[in-house]
Amino acid sequence: MSKAKVTLLIVYLLLLMVWQPQAAMARSPEAVNRADTLALVDAAWDALEPDFITAQKDYYAMTGRYFQGLRSHRGDVPDADSGGDYPSGWLTHPTDQQYRWSDFGLKLEKMEFEIWIDVYDGPEGPGWVACVNVYTKKEYWQKCRNYGPEALRSHDWELVTSEQFWSDQ
């Protein structure tokens, strides 16, 4: 075998060793399912976002502050009369606000994710951050979008550790 063929064979084998595991990992069912799930949640939030922005503008005009919502539901919309289980944030409100999700003015449908809204009043002015939480294959993912002057409050999808999640409950 010529030296050039041996060199090409070595390069080919090295490329297989380096690139093949990464390509296989990128195609794993878990990675594909997670990517699909997060993409679907992104699309769902994109569809809801204009309604949230309008509701926040209306709420701010009425109260002088943005709505702050504790963790919303995941799955079917809770019915206060059904006596079922509710996420802690659905029927309660933050201690410094009087309104809860059911008072916010949005008709939320069944969702496979949770939303929570945090508010701030920083040196550059007031704003709010909407975080979307989703569970995939025993993993908890979160993405936050800022609506106000503090752009650093936004972040793309992040895997949240169980310690971070449970300390947030």
Image (spheres, rainbow, N blue to C red):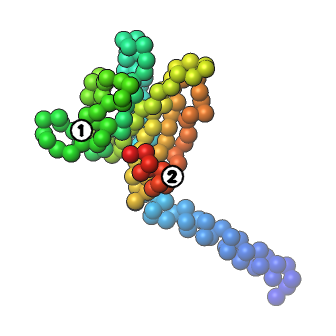
Q: Residue at x 43, y 40 (%)?
A: 132
Q: Mark 1 highlights which residue?
A: 77
The percent coordinates of residue 33 (x first, y second) are 43, 57
Q: Is residue 55 visible?
A: yes
Q: Position of residue 155 (x, y in %)?
A: 56, 40
Q: Assess whether mark 2 and mark 1 are in contact (beta carbons under 8 angstroms).
A: no
* Sequence-wise first label, 1 or 2: 1
Image x and y of residue 83, in percent? 14, 41
Q: Residues within 10 Å of mark 1 (few under 14, many from 20)?
A: some
Q: x, y percentage for residue 111?
A: 31, 41
> Gap between marks 1 and 2, in whole Å?
25 Å
Quadrant containing the N terminus is bottom right
Q: Name which residue lies at 27% across and 45% down.
A: 75
In terms of secondary structure, where does tag 2 sit?
strand
Number of labelled discs?
A: 2
Location of residue 79 (image quadrant)? top left
Kindly identify which residue carries mark 2.
159
Check disc 1 and give the amino acid type.
Val
Q: Hey, which quadrant is residue 115 in on the image?
A: top left
Reply above or below: 120 against 167.
above
Horizontal side, residue 15 vs residue 73: left or right: right
Which is nearer the eye, 15 or 2? 15
